[in-house]
Amino acid sequence: MVDTAPQLTDGVVPSHITSMALSRKKATTIALDPEADELLTRAARERGVSRSEFIRQQLALVLEQYRRHPKPRSAGIVRSLSERGDESELFGGRR
């Protein structure tokens, strides 16, 4: 019996093994109206990526605003109002 299982050779993955399976992406389906479908095809082609990759890239940009970012730690420059000093130096004596 001949082994027909795909083999990884020199880091090259056979084309029928999808990148989704290797990178653990979750598949989802969307419905597009014909105009959006055409625009998606054109935009992906202009960027030189697949339609799926184009959607992933654009979705990542939009979803970034919903990502929870850690609050920056204070550098300790301003500890309290009483330690700030005279701000008139910054504004040339006028405010």
Image: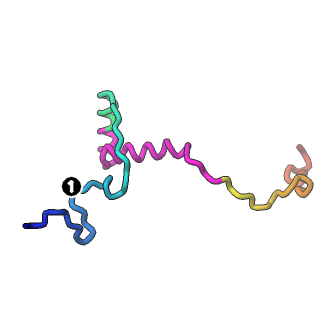
Q: Is residue 37 magenta?
A: no
The residue wearing badge 1 is 16
Left or right, residue 53 beside residue 66: left
Left or right, residue 59 beside residue 32: right
The x and y percentages for residue 40 are 33, 37
Please name the residue shown 7% across and 67% down the image: 1
Please name the residue shown 90% across and 58% down the image: 83
The x and y percentages for residue 54 are 36, 45
* Magenta stretch, main secondary structure class: helix
Left or right, residue 15 beside residue 23: left
Please name the residue shown 50% across and 43% down the image: 63
Q: From this view, report whether residue 32 is shown above or below residue 77.
A: above
The x and y percentages for residue 81 are 89, 52
Please name the residue shown 24% across and 56% down the image: 17
The x and y percentages for residue 9 are 22, 70
Q: Residue furthest left?
A: 1
Query: Residue 85's quadrant in the figure?
Result: bottom right
Q: How many marks?
A: 1
Task: Give the camera-side residue of 22 and 79.
Answer: 22
The secondary structure type at the circle numbered 1 is loop
**Quarter placement of the C terminus:** top right
Query: Residue 76's quadrant in the figure?
Result: bottom right
Q: Is residue 63 magenta?
A: yes
Q: Mark 1 belongs to which amino acid?
A: His
Read off the magenta span: 41-70
Q: From this view, report whether residue 93 is shown above or below residue 14.
A: above
